[in-house]
Each structure stands twice: as structure tokens, then as C-alpha cells.
Amino acid sequence: MTKSQYSAWQNLLREAVNETNSGRLNEKLQEAEAAIFLRLQELSVLQGNQQELEALQKACEELLEIQTQRLK
């Protein structure tokens, strides 16, 4: 894992979490979901990335919470 790959999906997640405009929130969520999905695919063929996998799991939970709480 490179730090830039890790931070790319984290940055998109942070943007979604901090988005206050409900019109743009769905777009930010989709971007974060796509980045997380792609990163999970990359990690599926690599060894020794347990810490990032755990962070990705938490990120998925956070996105789901945003979708259910803020977008209903």
C-alpha cells in the first residue's frame, strides 16, 4: 500500500462526511464508495494490509450511516 492510495479514498470519505449541501452529498458519497470499492479490489490480491482493510470496513459503515441518517 502506498500512502497516496490510502489517502485518496480517505480524502473522498472526508469530503462526503463534511459535505453540508444535500444536493452534492449524494455525488460525494458515490465518489467515496467508488474509491473504496476500487481499493478493496486492489487489496484483494495483496498480502499484509489488515490495517487498511479494517479502515475500509469502518469507512463503509460510516458511508452507510450517512446514507441512512442524512439522505434517508
Image: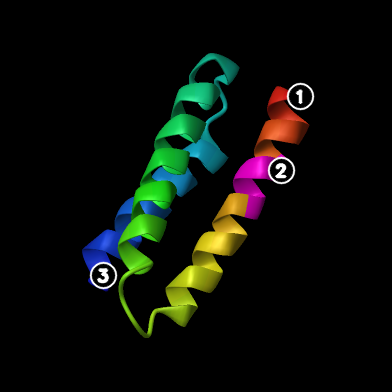
What is the count of numbered marks? 3
* Residue bearing mark 3: 3
The mark nearer the N terminus, 2 or 3, is: 3
Q: Which region shows up in magenta?
A: 61-65
Q: Is residue 66 magenta?
A: no
Whether 43 is drawn above or below 9: the answer is below
Q: Where is residue 8 in the image (x, y as percent from the top left)?
A: 30, 53
The mark nearer the N terminus, 1 or 2, is: 2
63 sits to left or right of 46: right
* Residue bearing mark 2: 65
Dot 2: within a 10 Å radius of its alpha carbon, few (fewer than 14), some, or many (20 or more) residues?
A: few
- Please, what is the three-letter code of the amino acid marked with disc 1? Lys
Whether 60 is drawn above or below 43: the answer is above
Task: Please give the name of the residue rendered at 46% of the width and 31% of the height, measured from the top-left corner.
Answer: 30
40 sits to left or right of 67: left
Between the C-alphas of marks 2 and 3, the distance is 26 Å
- Please, what is the three-letter code of the amino acid marked with disc 2? Glu
- Please, what is the three-letter code of the amino acid marked with disc 3? Lys
Q: Does the magenta stretch include residue 64?
A: yes
Which label is found at residue 11? none
Q: In which quarter of the image is the C terminus?
A: top right
* Residue bearing mark 1: 72
